[in-house]
Amino acid sequence: MTSTNEIRRSFLEYFGSQGHEVVHSAPLVPYNDPTLMFTNAGMVPFKNVFTGLETRAVPRATSSQKCVRAGGKHNDLDNVGYTARHHTFFEMLGNFSFGDYFKEQAITHAWTLLTREWGLPKDKLLATVYHTDDEAFELWKKIAGLPEERIIRIATKDNFWAMGDDGPCGPCSEIFFDHGDHIWGGPPGSAEEDGDRFIEIWNLVFMQFEQAAGEIVGNLPKPSIDTGMGLERVAAVLQGEHDNYDTDTFRALIAASEGLTGVKAEGDQRASHRVIADHLRSTSFLLADGVLPSNEGRGYVLRRIMRRAMRHAHLLGAREPLMHRLVGALVTEMGQAYPELGRAQPLIEETLLREEVQFRRTLSNGLKLLDEATTELGEGDKLPGETAFRLYDTFGFPYDLTEDALRSRGIAVDKDGFDAAMAQQKAAARAAWKGSGQTADSEVWFDIAEREGATEFTGYTATSGEGQVVALVKDGQEVPSASAGDEVIVLTNQTPFYGESGGQTGDSGAITGADGLKIVVSDTSKPLGRLHAHQGKIEAGTIKVGDAVALAVDTARRDATRANHSATHLLHAALRHRLGAHVTQKGSLVAPDRLRFDFSHPTALSAEDIAVIEAEVNAEIRGNEPVTTRLMTPDDAIAAGAMALFGEKYGDEVRVLSMGSTGAEHPYSVELCGGTHVRALGDIGVFRIVSESAVSSGVRRIEALTGEGARQWLVGREEALKHAASLLRTTPEEVEGRVAALLDERRKLERELADAKKALALGGGGAKAEAADEDVGGVKFAGQVLEGMDPKELRGLLDQAKQRLGSGVAVIVAVNDGRASIAAAVTDDLTGKVSAVDLVRAGVEALGGKGGGGRPDMAQGGGPDGAKAADAIAAVKAVIAG
């Protein structure tokens, strides 16, 4: 067992054989956790289990979790490529116990796997424990037989873990591997601990205490285990390497970049190859998990990683985009363990290519501007931070690229000045991160959920029913009652009202009760994903906690919403059929009056694409197949071909919706979905795409209508066509031909008008033109103001005027939409006396503008105030007159 893939598989198989549920890696974007930009540890997907907000059927789990550390507190980006063990992307192997086994079994599992299963020499291993954790100290002696000198007590926070100031916490025990005395460094806790001889390979966290405000206040009723082992580190140990980048996965990726660049990973080029290999992994997995490059948040971090790798490709001499050509090598190495990588390969390659083409333009422009900005700077000088920020903000030139480009010249960059300039721009994004995903009264929802449990949703089969009021919320606080006129949120033990989630808007309707109670429900939300909160206003009566009430959904609104939701499933399938399997949902809105569907695709859809997709969806609707629902485990559902949507949180049991394809072996669409849907596809009526547009780079949006909404839209279009036909004095069938004829006629008239304007410019020709000439300061002068003249035509007209004048100055001011362009021409014999550039600048100033340029014999400029055209002519004449 030497390959990284074999090590990962062996780890999961071992813990699977020990009663642990093998859990596939969660996405790199944490679900419903605004405190984290990326999943950065193996325990992140289980955070709510450890805090008691969620439960699992199996109290043991094991996983190999994808992790990224490239932003915020855990930021390894600047070190990557220059050290043996820093990465932006890594895999965290872990085993977890949720109130099941504790220290003794955790240590036993770790020691057994390392020494018996993997065969590591016992004399190469040592352990650390928290300095007061006598229990762990004695267990290491008992289970592993480690001598006391190889069990090191550590008093620092490195060996005590906490989730925050409040919640579970406990001591850690770390396992280290000794690479031998030929490498400098000392054991943990020693003065030489920062050396590379002793490397941590596994951290066992013993969650046994509860803390509040940073102080331990008691023991947890059910102590738990959280362990983490970096796959790259243990692979290096098991493969007999000291450097993570010398393991099989990285060797393969580096070999691929060597082959494409023709540059060996030696000397100064070694770091560049390592940066490319590491960043290829993080960018590819982030793209596969739905993150797209942008200028803020997660997308900004992704773009920064991408551009750092692309800069190193440039340093290696790559003259064409490189990164997208390496994706195949990554899929070969890791695609079996992570199938999502292979599924997303087309999108990853397309995005990397597009970004690198764009970045290479940035690189060229930025280096040129940087040279101009540092012309007068020498070794030991410092580039102002404001200049570095302007390069970044205007041209997308990263700070670290500016720093690297100047390093060889001995010029530093004012980082404080750059940060100060950046601070204002990033303030909004930082504020958004602090608050994303949570509301100010989230504690109220936690209190209700812990006390009452989840709301039972009965709306899959009913649109009305009875329930008991379990909580009332007003102005963010729980209240015992509310009366007429109050705006209140009502929570019941069960409800037919669908709470907004999965892109589907919440239901509206009414809640009624004793003594004339009536509440108009305007919306239903789903706090914490398990409560149904009815938001409404009390029209009559009083409502109290504990009351029995009747709940009735607005069925017309629900039916329209169901039709649109089912249509989004059909649309998703049609898009994948037409465009390819890389299409994945990036967002949706399912409302009663419309639907909106965002999906991954790099380019705009053609008219033919839209027509084919629309026709395919309508064919399924006409087939009128029943929509079937099955309850399955998530793993069984995905194995059966169901699409799981990115960003959705699925429980132990999921609803699998199958629809369409009459007589076919497989349904047209199979998706995991908790929304409400039509009973048969014919209930949708008709499907019509009304727009297709871009949302962001690599994400497209389709807006569509169904049923009555689509019918009304078509009626509106028909009425507009009839009105247009009436205006054109033709029939609706002949509108296209009539418009085409009018456009041809218009183009002909525009050409004739342009020719006439040219003929009229500067008085036309012959005696009439000469009569219009003036003598200004002894210089023959011809000037004209023209309305609607294309500025591009001015130079040609002036050339004609120069030929006619023989010796003199010609000026034209062209006015278009309130703005003016001015052009001046001076015959060659007069350029020593009069410069066309000076004339144009005088005219531009009169027009309210600045500048203008060209040659002494021909110049052009413009200004915003076309009403001053005559003043511009006068200003030119004044310059000539001297």
Image (cartoon, rainbow, N blue to C red):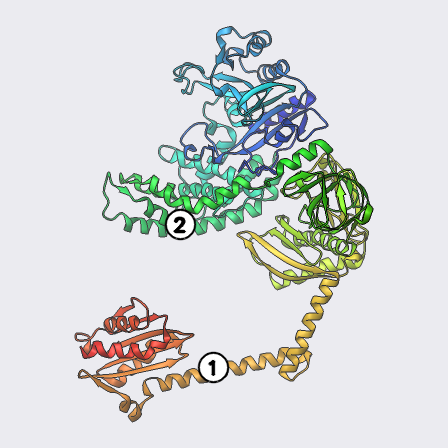
Which amino acid, mark 1? Glu
- Compared across the picture, whether 680 is left or right of 275 comes to right
Q: Position of residue 830 (x, y in %)?
A: 19, 78
Q: Nearer the viewer, residue 167 or 235?
A: 167
Q: Quadrant of the N terminus?
A: top right
- Pointer 2 residue: 393
Q: Which mark is residue 553?
A: none
Q: Nearer the viewer, residue 718 or 86?
A: 718
Whether residue 739 is situated above or below residue 691 in the rendered picture: below
Q: Residues within 10 Å of mark 2 (few under 14, many from 20)?
A: some
Q: Position of residue 770 (x, y in %)?
A: 27, 90
Which residue appears at 71% of the width and 37% of the height?
634
Q: Position of residue 565 (x, y in %)?
A: 72, 52
Whether residue 596 is situated above or below residue 772 in the rendered picture: above
Which amino acid, mark 2? Asp
Label 1 sits on a secondary structure element that is: helix
Q: Nearer the viewer, residue 42 or 229?
A: 42
Q: Residues within 10 Å of mark 1 (few under 14, many from 20)?
A: few
- Pointer 1 residue: 750
